Amino acid sequence: MLPAIESATREIRCLDGMWRFAVDWDNTGIDDRLYADSLPGNREVAVPGSVNDLFADEDIRNHVGHWFYQRDVRVPRGWDGERIILRFGSATHHAVVFVDDVEVGRNKGGYMPFEFDITDRVAPGGTFRLTVAVDNRLDNTCIPPGEVRELPDGRRQQNYLHDFYNYSGLHRSVLLYSRPARHVTDVTITTDYTGTTGHVTWEVAQSEEGPVRIAVVDKQTGEVVARAGGTRGTVDIEDVTLWTPGVGGLYDLVVALLDDADGPVDIFTQHFGVRTVRVDGYRFLINDTPFYFTGFGMHEDHETIGKAHSNAHMVQDAELLSWIGANSMRTSHYPYSEEFMDYCDRHGIVVIDETPAVGLNWMMAGGILDSGGGETYEEGHVDDDTQATHKEEIRRLVARDKNRPSVVIWSIANEPDTTSPKSVDYFRPLVELTRECDPTRPVGFVNVMFAPYDVCRITGMFDVIMLNRYYGWYVDSGDLETSERKFAEELKGWTEKYRLPIIITEYGADTVAGLHSIYDQPFTEDYQVAYLKMNSKVFDECEAVVGEQMWNFADFQTKYGFARVDGNKKGAFTRDRRPKAAARYLRERWTSMEAARYGRRDHRAR
Ligand code: GCB
């Protein structure tokens, strides 16, 4: 899906702010036509924002089902004759949208933008009542999957197999925008270069056939560097500025749909960067230069706003990434906001872009994941319905992010069960689909500790190996000597069997900020540093390791569990972004590491 942009032919009205709010306690609100009038009660909610931490009411926080959002919207007078589109950055996890008394559409999945053409329902200069029923329920038809349990006392409980809190709400901006009847519906840009000449291949789709012209504009200088006509083709850029990790470097592809007299009908601008990504033996090459990933798996997670996007928090997180010497991140465990991805494109932050396929693993019984155990790939757990949604999530993620230079790997799942023979049939079509949607980027998935190289059945289908490993934390807890030996042995096994680049996408230890000990005691800041040092040593000694993304950038909220004290505490930063001792250690390592020089953002000089 294309982003919403402003141009000479497109305008945006942002609908963020305070909305009316009601909890649909019995989940009968749609049948009862709650949307047909002003919502009952006088509660209000912030958009964007998660609902869960806003109200001093535990029943609201724990509600399983619908929340109703509502506001009145005025349509700009000048939009007569234009198509009028209502666009949501995301609604977690599902939404039913009403304009006045009429349902205009539904969306399934919590992390993707969606939009509806409401031209026929509204009048420029007039107002309408916009109501959204947001649903936080997850079942086996969802990605991520979950299960709603009915308790003997009649309460409903949402169970899920992932380690982050099930925040819900309108997490990203809601926009009303206008576009012409004949408009650009899709743009695909792929790039390459020879010597100092960049090659840009474009393809434009439009709602009705007609003449098309494109121009390539250097975003830095504003200069037009190439022009062409037609819905597809390739143009060259002389003296091209490559999109470079740690730096950025963007161009705009300006697409003009023309009428027969050459007048502009629709103007759409898509940014892109000229760069290549390739795997060569153990090496991961960006612009034919070996790239070593430093950084984190992160979460969209902050106090009060939960999983909502906020520009201020985004800038702070990105600045901390730069300060610590991180050149990359993984959007664990779902696609992040378009604003965040745009920022990464502009600033040269390298991204492993992940679908929301987390928790596809019933093998990890009990404990923090609370699955109850059992076979993963069976009816009601991960089945054909789950797979159909998983495919849709891959299609939508690639459609949204395919033009982003920052995205260098598609991660199609986090820690699925890959020990079951059925995992092969589940994943093969997904890998093929991802490659079909985007033949230009390596495809990977993130492997769980219980599926080492001699057990995992699906690694051979992928271009890179991504491993989450917790030696010294979940296994051999507190014993760093044994951990070092076992980890090194395991990496040797992966290296010899697959001869592919390995990125360690998670390694970490829960750490309570301020807790210290002269002994290497788990949960202390001292242990976290010792643990990281042990891991660093193992990475440095393995030639196939091309990256380390520590778990996690910051402490984050999870559901309650006996191993979770107010959330997951593996952050290098606390939830309010104060550095633990680990942050200083990582900074020292990453800002001086020769292997990670390409892509390092010079924090001060920027
Ligand atoms: C993992 C998961 C991540 C958890 C982490 C942990 O392997 O991928 O979502 O938060 O472990 O801290 O247990």
Image (cartoon, helix red, strand yellow):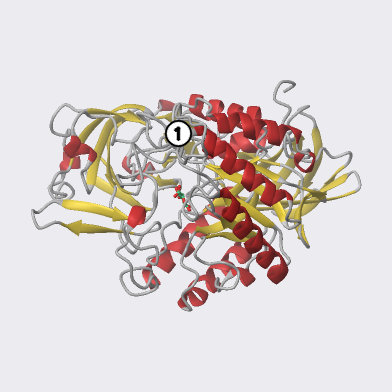
In the picture, which quadrant includes the C terminus? top right
Q: Is residue 57 left or right of residue 109?
A: left
Residue 211 seen anywhere in this rendered image of the structure: no
Q: Is residue 148 left or right of residue 351?
A: left
Q: Which residue is mark 1?
A: 309
Q: Residue 361 placed where, x, y %?
A: 41, 64
Which corner quadrant of the image does residue 486 belong to? bottom right
Which corner quadrant of the image does residue 495 belong to? bottom right
Q: Is residue 3 left or right of residue 377?
A: right
Q: Secondary structure at mark 1?
A: loop
Q: Residue 55 placed where, x, y %?
A: 23, 29
Q: Is residue 153 above or below residue 361?
A: above
Nearer to the camera, 293 or 579: 579
How many numbered callouts?
1
At 58% from the left edge and 39% from the top edge, which residue is drawn? 530
Q: Residue 603 placed where, x, y %?
A: 70, 25
Nearer to the camera, 428 or 398: 428
> Residue placed farthest to the left in the image?
153
At 44% from the left edge and 56% from the top edge, which residue is drawn? 358
Q: Residue 245 placed where, x, y %?
A: 73, 39
Residue 122 seen anywhere in this rendered image of the structure: yes
Which corner quadrant of the image does residue 321 belong to? top right
Q: Is residue 23 above or below residue 200?
A: above
Mark 1, Cα crowd under 10 Å, few <14 / some 14-19 / many 20+, is many
Looking at the picture, which amino acid does disc 1 mark? His
Nearer to the camera, 603 or 19: 603
Judge: label 1 CB < 8 Å from ligand 1.
Answer: no
At 63% from the left edge and 66% from the top edge, which residue is drawn? 462
